[in-house]
Image (cartoon, rainbow, N blue to C red):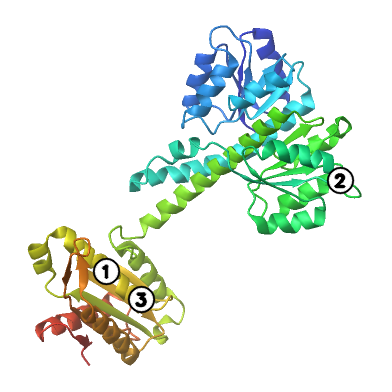
Amino acid sequence: MSARVLIVDDLFPNVKLLETKLGLEYFDTLAAMNGRDAIAICEKGLCDLVLLDVMMPGMDGFEVCRHLKSNPVTAHIPVVMVTALDQPSDRLRGLDAGADDFLTKPVDDTALFTRVRSLVRLKAVTDELRQRALASREFGIGDPLALAAAETGLDARILLIEDRPGSAERLAGALRQHHAVTIEPDPQAALVLAAEGGFDLALVSLDLDGFDGLRLCSQLRSLDRTRAMPLIMLAEEHDRARVVRGLDFGVHDFLMRPVDRNELLARARTQVKRRRFTEALRGAMQASLQMAVTDALTGLHNRRYLDNHLGALFAQPGARHSALAALILDIDHFKRINDGYGHEAGDEVLRGFADRVRQHTRPVDIVARYGGEEVVVILPEAGLAEAQVIAERIRERVEAVPFSVQRATRSIGVTVSIGVAVRHADDADPSAMLRRADLALYRAKAAGRNRVEPQAA
């Protein structure tokens, strides 16, 4: 997978060295010689990943990283800190600033390419979610990027797969400052637990007794229920080749033993934040899709949903020979409610009316707000007689119990008129059936309201 990599370093030879290495692996590169230029490039969306030198005059790499990760526009861009500093405290500063990883100079080529490919894959998934989630702004949900970027990465459920009791307790003790930790020494039991437990993160020892920890990582990455769960490998110095293999097939991060307590907390927090960032974007996308087909006031489906699904029902092969009925419901004298009690009370009545209609229809039925105080119910596999029974049940329920309004301080008696129609074999589209239901509704109104009228014979 190719990508655009931004190299940020104030020393030109360092920039050229990384450009050459990445170019040989078919990555496109951009360069910035200072932090402010790097931020500007990222804000324009011109790169997929940042290789960021720490030691720069003016704005150093830590400050640049904090700026990028606190800005909703750039928070999703992976940042790899590149520096000659190699102490745990230096790595911790970078991770606390929001860095996704840390490479020490001189940069090992295998580690560089593996890290870049791994992070670019993750960003490709995030980018798709971001583009879809941005549509939610149009529906008044708020800014999904700002909500996602505000995630702290704390209070997570973490699964620790480690069969060394002493090591397991030390790691769990550190993590329990901010998270709930479950220790499971048995890899097979851990696989079942992970699939059922809803964990935010798993840490996997690569040197489990009698079992290949890397194979367990592979199994966790392949199962539908655990594929999205972040994984951190716990490795010994001699495991470096296996770590590279794990990163190559999608494991998210690793820690080398002896594990630094602070680095453990920082890397766990980074992975949880990234997981929740993705989940927040996915949730915003789902909400926007839901709002696109839902009436905001009543929670019923809207006219767009009705038109699309009713059209699909008529387009199905052999559809004209299967039963299908339509009800058009209209609240009687609704204008009097708005004029006498106010539009807010009218809205309360509409919401209550929608709830009662939902309660007396089936899961397979389509219930949609048609406009104003009108609701349409589509009843698959229902004939005229069955549809009339359902309509009468709704009418009786609406009339039987007054509607509470104005914070339940007043109640209003409400009735509904309903027109019923069924599909004819020669109906080319839904409009003819709905027209018959509308004419039946008109007759119900003319005959005194609060009644159900079937289509004309």
Q: Position of residue 126 (x, y in %)?
A: 55, 41
Which of pointers 1 and 3 lies earlier in the amino acid sequence? 1
* Left or right placement of residue 221 versus residue 125 in this view: right
Q: Secondary structure at mark 1?
A: helix
Q: Residue 80, can we see it?
A: no
Give the farthest residue toward the right.
Answer: 210
Mark 3: amino acid: Gln
**Camera-nearest residue between 274 and 41:** 274
Quick one: label 3, few (<14), some, or many (20+) residues within 10 Å? few
* Left or right placement of residue 107 versus residue 178 in this view: right
Residue at figure coordinates x 61%, y 38% from the top left: 178
Q: Is residue 410 above or below residue 205?
A: below
Residue at figure coordinates x 13%, y 82% from the top left: 449
What residue sits right under mark 2 in the picture?
208
Which of pointers 3 and 2 lies earlier in the amino acid sequence? 2
What residue sits right under mark 3 in the picture?
359
Q: Is residue 78 above or below residue 18?
A: below
Mark 1: amino acid: Gly
Which of pointers 1 and 2 lies earlier in the amino acid sequence? 2
Give the quadrant of the C terminus: bottom left
* Left or right placement of residue 428 versus residue 179 in this view: left
Q: Position of residue 391 (x, y in %)?
A: 28, 84
Q: Position of residue 387 (x, y in %)?
A: 32, 86
What residue sits right under mark 1 in the picture?
352
Mark 2: amino acid: Leu
Q: Secondary structure at mark 2?
A: loop
**Camera-nearest residue between 439 and 292:** 292
